[in-house]
């Protein structure tokens, strides 16, 4: 227990270091851009540009700006939007993170739920039609990018089934209605569900041939107990190891999904800010993403020993 | 003498045993690959993709950029088998042009990723020590961040902001490679770590081989199988990255017939002209599928545990 706490502390420090490091790279990259953020403002006078630069501290030399930014990050202050003056970035991004996290959580639910279901069914009914259907779905689904699934989802639910869905899925103004969640979440989670299904099938096939599963059957345990408690629990271990890359994939995928469906989350902010040249927000989104992915990976690593007691910290 | 009979005996017995034949890694892998129908299907689709890409370099039914060759949003017709897009451009021609871009991005990225990852992985695995610690640190840090989004920013900074590389296929390849060499490096490092302890490397060392010769003549060829597999999987990943960027409007500039950009063009008029968005997305999905199938087939073919 003490080891676990120590381990988590160590990892949290590493996450903080990684986050600062990655967003520093982005900070330095974006500050290499010649000119300044206000050159495109056609009606601005030199005096007002100078005032704007002074307001954002952009008139100082780069090292000083960096130290100032770093100081802000450490205190949880990511600065102010360059385009919409007065909008502080940290509260904005926290609000958007909750939206992104909701969709991402449901996507993860789709990925793991559907992936495990297909994988287990395919393994238990190996070489029957169930297996063939599940396996070919997996091998095809894995290759279809999430934005393609999103487009098809939009076409089917927003257009062909318009009468049935009454447009509620997409045409509700604003965000916050639960009917808006399923289609984006499925589009985001489906490619990875196929991947999870493949891995689950392979590891289930290995596990159901082991001696302890045979013993469980021989003891006359019920099928659910054997499959869920003896076989699946051990078959889950390889699945958990890919959860880290999977979360990174869902984060990356959410950028395009949020733009297709107009979801006001971090991904939409990211693209909007790049196109609007709002560098402060771009750097801020990056800081959030690095921290989020780090924390998600840590969560995975902490639940890992619960599944596999051989692993300890 | 009476030795004729005993000589015949082992010959008979030998015929019943399977005589191990001389096979190299590549012929052995090729043989197993040929038996994998899914991988073969993938290889055929990839061959078609390459042929279409080559043809599009010299001929497409219409120029990929030419607008108003017919009514905008027109559906499939005999003159335009895949229809026309929102600017009246021939979609078949643009799909063909997109194949060329896909091939360039995929193959280019796989090559550059290997060119960065292989030497770094070899050095880290072979010399160990501080070099290894440094390279492994970078690799481990990088695994915890959304690297494609760093690549996205790199494309933006390198082309739009610094004007170092004009916005095009090359900047996408560079950005992808700079952020994704870690997969190859990690793999090669592991292979080098294992191979450097093997007897044939020891023998080469005793024969007076220099480090360079040992790395590239003895260790690298023996790690080639997994590297080829990894490079094959890098191709669909890079293709997807390009489509992802172009779909968001951050990739290749407008007249370029990138499949991702075509999908983005089409999706605004999806409710009355779905053919515009269907053609590029289906082409993209089939391409990714083919590379994944071939990659899976190659992995099974090179994996020694699958040996007959």
Image (spheres, grey):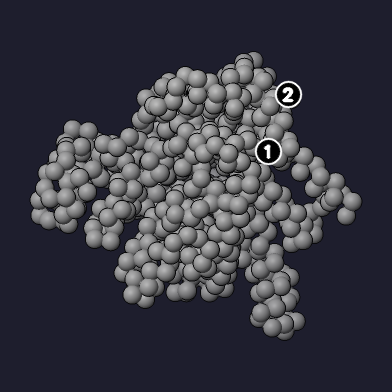
Q: Where in the figure is residue B173, as x and y percent of width and height?
A: 43, 32
Residue shown at the point (50%, 20%) measured from the top left: A47
Q: Which mark is residue A77?
A: 1
On screen, residue A280 above or below A97 = above
How crowded is the residue under tag 2: few (<14 C-alpha within 10 Å), some, or many (20+)? few
Q: Is residue A170 left or right of residue A103?
A: left
Of helix, strand and loop, which one carries label 1?
Answer: loop
Q: Nearer the viewer, residue A2 or A79?
A: A79
Picture quadrant of residue A202 = bottom right
Residue shown at the point (77%, 57%) measured from the top left: A305
Q: Where in the figure is residue B119, as x and y percent of width and height?
A: 56, 25
- Number of numbered markers: 2
Task: Check disc 2 and report the residue beneath it.
Answer: B130
Q: Can you see residue A219?
A: yes
Residue shown at the point (49%, 48%) measured from the top left: A268
> Given the image, what chain letter belongs to the residue carrying mark 2?
B
Q: Nearer the viewer, residue B61 or B20?
A: B61
> Given the image, what chain letter belongs to the residue carrying mark 1?
A
- Alpha-carbon distance for marks 2 and 1? 36 Å
Q: Can you see residue A119?
A: no
């Amino acid at each position: 227990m003490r080891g676990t706490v120590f381990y988590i502390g160590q990892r949290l420090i590493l996450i903080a270091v990684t986050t600062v490091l990655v967003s520093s790279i982005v900070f330095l990259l974006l500050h290499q851009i010649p000119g300044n953020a206000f050159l495109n403002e056609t009606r601005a006078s030199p005096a007002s540009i100078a005032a704007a630069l002074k307001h954002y501290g952009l008139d100082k030399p780069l090292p000083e700006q960096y130290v100032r930014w770093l100081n802000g990050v450490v205190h949880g202050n990511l600065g102010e939007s360059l385009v919409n003056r007065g909008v502080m970035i940290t509260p904005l991004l926290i609000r958007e993170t909750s939206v992104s996290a909701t969709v991402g959580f449901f996507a993860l639910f789709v990925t793991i739920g559907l992936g495990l279901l297909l994988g287990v069914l395919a393994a238990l009914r190996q070489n029957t039609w169930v297996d063939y259907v599940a396996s070919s779905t997996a091998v095809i689904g894995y290759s279809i990018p999430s934005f393609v699934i999103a487009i098809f989802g939009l076409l089917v639910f927003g257009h062909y089934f318009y009468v049935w869905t009454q447009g509620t899925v997409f045409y509700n103004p604003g965000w916050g209605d639960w009917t808006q969640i399923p289609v984006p979440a499925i589009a985001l989670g489906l490619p990875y569900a196929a991947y999870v299904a493949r891995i689950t099938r392979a590891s289930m096939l290995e596990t159901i041939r082991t001696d302890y599963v045979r013993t469980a059957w021989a003891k006359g345990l019920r099928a659910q107990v054997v499959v869920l408690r003896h076989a699946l629990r051990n078959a889950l271990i390889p699945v958990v190891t890919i959860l880290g890359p999977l979360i990174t994939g869902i984060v990356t995928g959410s950028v395009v999904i949020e733009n297709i469906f107009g979801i006001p989350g971090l991904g939409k902010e990211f693209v909007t800010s790049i196109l609007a040249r709002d560098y402060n927000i771009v750097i801020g989104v990056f800081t959030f993403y690095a921290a989020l992915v780090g924390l998600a990976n840590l969560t995975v690593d902490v639940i890992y020993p619960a599944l596999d007691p051989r692993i300890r910290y | 003498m009476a030795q004729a009979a005993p000589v015949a005996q082992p010959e008979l017995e030998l015929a019943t045993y399977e005589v191990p034949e001389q096979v190299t890694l590549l012929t052995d892998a090729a043989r197993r690959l040929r038996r994998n129908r899914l991988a073969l299907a993938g290889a055929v689709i990839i061959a078609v993709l390459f042929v279409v890409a080559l043809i599009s370099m010299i001929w497409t039914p219409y120029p990929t950029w030419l607008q108003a060759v017919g009514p905008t949003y027109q559906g499939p017709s005999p003159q335009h088998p895949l229809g026309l897009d929102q600017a009246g451009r021939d979609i078949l021609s643009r799909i063909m042009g997109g194949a060329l871009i896909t091939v360039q991005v995929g193959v280019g990225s796989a090559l550059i990723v290997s060119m960065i990852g292989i030497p770094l992985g070899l050095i880290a695995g072979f010399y160990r020590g501080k070099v290894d610690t440094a390279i492994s640190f970078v690799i481990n840090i990088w695994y915890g961040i959304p690297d494609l989004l760093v690549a996205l920013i790199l494309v933006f900074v390198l082309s739009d902001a610094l004007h170092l590389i004009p916005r095009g296929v090359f900047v996408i390849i560079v950005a992808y490679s700079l952020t994704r060499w870690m997969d190859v490096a990690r793999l090669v490092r592991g292979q080098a770590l294992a191979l450097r302890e093997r007897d044939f490397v020891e023998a080469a060392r005793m024969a007076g081989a220099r480090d360079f010769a040992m790395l590239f003549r003895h260790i690298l060829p023996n790690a080639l199988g997994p590297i080829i597999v990894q490079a094959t999987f890098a191709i669909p990943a890079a293709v997807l990255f390009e489509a992802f960027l172009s779909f968001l409007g951050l990739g290749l500039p407008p007249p370029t017939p990138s499949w991702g950009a075509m999908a983005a063009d089409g999706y605004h008029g999806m409710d009355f002209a779905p053919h515009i968005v269907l053609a590029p997305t289906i082409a993209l999905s089939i391409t990714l599928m083919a590379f994944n199938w071939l990659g899976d087939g190659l992995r099974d073919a090179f994996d020694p545990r699958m040996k007959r």
